Image: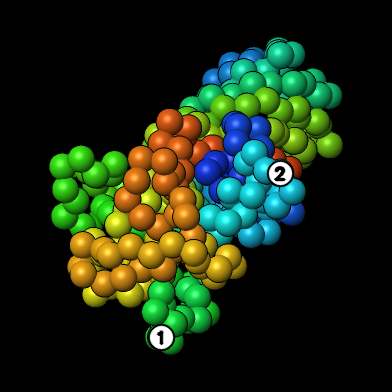
Amino acid sequence: MIGVSLNALNYYGDLSPRPGSFSTDISFTRPALGLEFSHRFGPRYALTASFMYGTLKGSDNESADQGDLDNGIYRYQRNLSFRNRIKELSVVASFDLFPNSATYISRVQWTPYGFVGVAGFLHNPQALAPATDLNNNPLPEAGEWVDLQPLGTEGQNAQLQAGDMNQGIKPYKKLQVAIPFGLGARFRLNEILDFSVELGFRYLFTDYIDDVSRNYVDLGVFGNDALAKAMSYRSSEIVTPTSTYTGRDGQNYNVVPGYGSEYPDNIRGSKNDRDIYMVTTFKLTYILGKTFHRAKFR
């Protein structure tokens, strides 16, 4: 069986509108395209290999509720954002509730099913660079989508000191593993075509789909990398800074209190909650076996 799918991707993570595993911004739903090949091993079981390409997106400025004084205002003032173009290759096993006890021609009219498997995906979080750096000098990358992982926005590329909140942090990998799982329903259209609807989730082993996971660092640890500083701390773009400190590089930094400096309570993200993305799938499947057998015995 070979299938094509149109998918909708939704992101759940540190840049969701509210804390919690079930918070997402529906307005950031983005399409994804998929191609798959399946083989049935029995009346209830099938194995499917598939490739999917799509985009995830999140933004504090656009999603957070400024009127929520417990969580929303903090997220709004944090002002981080991202997009991430996902390339996913997966293998999943599915189990049909109703068995196909005969041939493809006489298969059931419809059946619910569940699926679980393993996936490898390539991701690369990006964000739009602001017009100026933290000293109000024009950035050469202004208005461009820049890759965040090479910048080490939480100090991954810096020499952090013992006692720093992010001490020991390492660069995250762009190639990751996930566990896809979910439920679906498949409907017979005719002898050779099926239509399926799925709701699936990807359990991830990374918290960096959005490039956000741990604490802010002293902006001085980025040295002369103006772009890394600007992408690590973005609160001053929308809130007037009222605090100044001298960084480890000897420069003075004007920041919004609670953001952009080394302190236990200056939390950029939550490393205890892994990111998740949800995949809603609409799939059309062509049954190769039916056509093959008809030609063979004609």
Residue to which mark 1 is pinned: 137
Question: Residue 195 occupies which quadrant of the picture?
Answer: top right
**Left or right: where does residue 220 sit relative to residue 289?**
left
- Can residue 50 be seen from the camera position used here? no
Q: Is residue 136 left or right of residue 154?
A: right
Residue at 49%, 64% (x, y): give it: 242
Q: Who comes first in sequence, dot 2 or dot 1? A: 2
Residue 298 left/right relative to 247? right
Residue type at numbered disc 2: Asp
**Is there CB contact under 8 Å for labels 2 and 1?**
no
Q: Is residue 267 visible?
A: yes
Estimate the x, y position of residue 199 in percent, counting from the top left: 69, 33
Q: Position of residue 7 (x, y in %)?
A: 67, 48
- Give the image quarter of residue 271: top left
Relative image position of residue 257 (x, y in whole percent)? 47, 55
Helix, strand, or loop for circle 2? loop
The residue located at (42%, 46%) in the rendering is 266
Secondary element type, mark 1: loop
Q: Residue at x 64, y 49 (%)?
A: 73
Residue 19, disc: none
Foreground residue among 237 and 257: 257
Residue depicted at 36% across the width and 73% down the height:
227
Mark 2 Cα shell of 10 Å, populated few (<14), some (14-19), many (≥20): few
